[in-house]
Image (cartoon, rainbow, N blue to C red):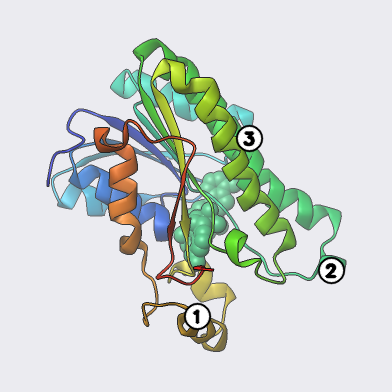
């Protein structure tokens, strides 16, 4: 199935590690040229892509910064002349009970997960409208369907990006731009490795129908489907890829 995205240009935010890294490698593996937009250097991702014969451009970009987003989109258009795909993946998920969520933490979570999705989307839509095509994929979370505790601010943002996708699907459908979401279950990534112990992760596996830990590559099939013409008549939807954890 290689080269489904030959000639396409994709931006992946948060592409230096974890799910974003796996997405960037998968998109490049299908022939897309991939812009790796992350607050961290994405050299490892770029090396993985180039070693496999693909092409990538790394841009340091804090998705909460309008200036960074504008510069990243400008750099993409300067290098490749178009943007076909945006994957809004950058996100953080600090665990905190509601009474321990101060304004600084609330604003940080909303800023990266929700405002970042808004800013990146707003920046790519004009060029997609002119091209008459585009694919925007927001990374939500299975926690929105599970109602996972200790994550109220995070889960609020992950519901919000679904809401944003549903509204934009209607707003942009006439321009042949599809806006969908992927909702991962608990997935082994550097962010999760740093923040969650084995007990919590084993507990999630118990709730899943598939009895193993999810890895980023488990979502590649959904991602490539949503980025390819195979999904052209599907918009405003959520693909829940969580091993069957949230099935009620
Ligand atoms: P991760 O391992 O922490 O990697 C995320 C990458 O995004 C990191 O390089 C991170 O840099 C970067 N980033 C953070 N803030 C940024 C910003 N303001 N601008 C640009 N880049 C930024 O995370 P992940 O586990 O792969 O998660 C990726 C996405 O999937 C998130 O939206 C998350 O909510 C969602 N998700 C994850 C899981 C899971 O279990 N892993 C489940 C459901 C949904 P730093 O290292 O400096 O933070």
Read off the residue under disc 1.
207
Element type at mark 1: helix
* Residue contact at pointers 1 and 2, CB within 8 angstroms: no
* Residue contact at pointers 3 and 2, CB within 8 angstroms: no
Q: Residue 145, image x and y in percent?
A: 59, 61
Q: Which quarter shows the C terminus? A: bottom right
70 or 226, nearer to the observer: 226
Q: Which of the 4 image quadrants contains residue 3?
A: top left
Read off the residue under disc 2.
100
Q: Residue 224, image x and y in percent?
A: 28, 45
Q: Is mark 2 within 8 Å of ligand 1?
A: no
Is the residue marked by circle 1 packed among few (<14), some (14-19), or many (20+) residues within 10 Å? Answer: some
**Residue at the farthest front position:** 248
Q: Residue 108, image x and y in percent?
A: 72, 51
Is the residue marked by circle 2 packed among few (<14), some (14-19), or many (20+) residues within 10 Å? Answer: few
Q: Distance between the Cα atoms at labels 1 and 2?
A: 27 Å
Residue drawn 45% across the image and 16% down it: 174
Q: Which of the 4 image quadrants contains residue 11?
A: top left
Residue drawn 60% across the image and 57% down it: 92
Residue 65 — which label? 3
Is the residue marked by circle 3 packed among few (<14), some (14-19), or many (20+) residues within 10 Å? Answer: some
Would you say residue 165 is visible in this rendering? yes
Element type at mark 3: loop
Element type at mark 2: helix
Would you say residue 68 is visible in this rendering? no
Q: Is mark 3 within 8 Å of ligand 1?
A: yes
Quick check: 112 above or below 4?
below
Q: Which of the 4 image quadrants contains residue 10?
A: top left
Give the mark toward the camera: 1 or 2. Answer: 1
């Amino acid at each position: 199935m290689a080269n489904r995205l030959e000639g396409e240009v994709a931006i992946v935010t948060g592409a230096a590690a974890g799910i974003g890294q796996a997405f960037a490698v998968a998109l490049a593996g299908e022939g897309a040229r991939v812009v790796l937009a992350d607050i961290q250097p994405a050299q490892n991702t770029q090396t993985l892509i180039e070693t496999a014969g693909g092409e990538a451009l790394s841009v340091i970009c804090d998705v909460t910064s309008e200036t960074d987003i504008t510069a990243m989109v400008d750099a993409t258009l300067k290098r490749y002349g178009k943007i076909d795909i945006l994957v809004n993946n950058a996100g953080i998920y600090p665990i905190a009970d509601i009474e321990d969520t101060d304004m600084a933490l609330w604003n940080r979570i909303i800023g990266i997960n929700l405002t970042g999705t808004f800013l990146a989307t707003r920046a790519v839509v004009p060029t997609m409208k002119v091209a008459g095509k585009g694919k925007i994929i927001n990374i939500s979370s299975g926690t929105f369907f599970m109602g996972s505790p200790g994550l109220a601010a995070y889960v609020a943002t992950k519901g919000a990006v679904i809401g944003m996708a549903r509204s934009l699907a209607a707003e942009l459908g006439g321009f042949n731009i599809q806006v969908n979401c992927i909702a991962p279950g608990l997935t082994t990534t550097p962010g999760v490795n740093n923040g969650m112990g084995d007990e919590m992760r084993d507990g999630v596996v118990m709730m899943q129908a598939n009895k193993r830990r999810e890895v980023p590559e488990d979502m590649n099939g959904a991602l490539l489907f949503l980025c390819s013409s195979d999904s052209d008549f599907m918009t405003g939807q959520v693909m829940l890829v969580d091993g069957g954890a949230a099935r009620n």
